[in-house]
Image (spheres, helix red, strand yellow):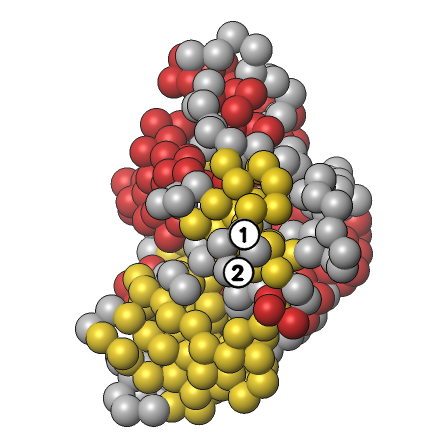
Amino acid sequence: MKKVIVGISGGVDSAVAAYLLKKDGYDVEGLFMRNWDATINNDYLGNPTLNESICPQEQDYNDAKITCEILDIPLHRVDFIKEYWDYVFTYFLEELKKGRTPNPDLLCNKFIKFDLFKKEALKLGADYIATGHYARIVQLSNGRYTLKRSKTLAKDQTYALYNLTQNQLSKTLMPVGEYSKDEIRAIAQKAGIPVAHKPDSQDICFVEDDYGKFIEEETGVSIEPGNFVDPEGNILGQHKGIIHYTIGQRRGLGLSLKQPGYVIRVDKDKNEVVIGTKDQLYSKVLYGNRCNFMSIPSVEGERRTTAKIRYNSPEVPCTIRMAEEDLIEVVFDKPQRAVTPGQAVVFYDDGIVVGGATIVK
């Protein structure tokens, strides 16, 4: 009997993943990861006012315990607080200060949920790890493992998982990807799992809504104000710090303009936020680095794919090629709105993940 360690978060998706795997005959155990603790991270931040209610992981842990008791499987617990700080939160801070819009969930998936978690699972004798992600893992005829979109596109999470390695994919199970969210809740309710109707958790647990406000209030990092400028460099007003702005932003600028203005670029070196028109938000070409390929080992010559430039954006046709060793050029058939450095661009081929990269420009 193969042993599977399931990442039990305290939510319904991971609970049903464990239930389905046990039903399929696996030897199932749960592992709860504690990645953020307001009290401990308060010491890192040096700020006694840190809001301890932002990430209620103790309640999640209690939910996880009850779930595992009902499923009659053991539950282990591990702390990755320091590792999350070193690999995810520090990156998040540095990217914001560079004027980019980071997605820490991507690094959390790669380094915490599918790396450190896997190593901990191996110590427990696991043959596989499993999660409650809405995605499907398939092995192609060329022998490579990749991701396939989940049954329900509304919940598909392949975008946030594009940077998993072949080794990680080959040892991971994602049973939830075969179901819709409603079906998962119905399965949980029928199985008597108490979190059947628990609301979905917020992915970035240490930030409630405003990244810039969080950084200034909770980390003590001083962000210098600077100038809003138009594309020609003419000063339009003063901004309150580049971490408060992202490409495509229109609201909260505090500018009085003759026509609607949008953030079209953030210049860290000049500490400027460039304001332009809606038309100037569109780009036909982008470049990305930190490339990771799944369905293919690398891109040879030009390749036609579709691409997503943010989690909720549609897939759009494009042509990709390697401009340098770790720099991919993406040319869209039609210009795309608000291409944002720091976010991911993920490539698909008929629902299969080809690979992805971090947008740099």
User: Most extreme residue toward the top, as rendered?
Assistant: 48
Q: In 3D space, how far apart are the residues under numbered discs 1 and 2 (Cα atoms)? A: 8 Å
Q: How many marks?
A: 2
Mark 1: secondary structure: loop
Q: Quadrant of residue 211?
A: top right
How packed mark 1 is, by other alpha carbons closer than 10 Å (few <14, some 14-19, many 20 or more), is few
- Residues 276 and 110: in front is 276
Q: Which residue is at a point 28% across and 91% down the rendered structure image?
A: 301
Q: Tag 2: residue type?
A: Pro
Q: Which residue is mark 2?
A: 231
Q: Which residue is at a point 48% across and 12% down the rendered structure image?
A: 47
Q: Which residue is at a point 38% across and 56% down the rendered structure image?
A: 128
Residue 234's disc is 1
| Quadrant position of the C terminus in the picture | bottom left
Q: Tag 1: residue type?
A: Asn
- Residues 245 and 321: in front is 245
Q: Which residue is at a point 31% across and 62% down the rendered structure image?
A: 290
Disc number lying in front (1 or 2): 1
* Residue 246 visible in the shown view: yes
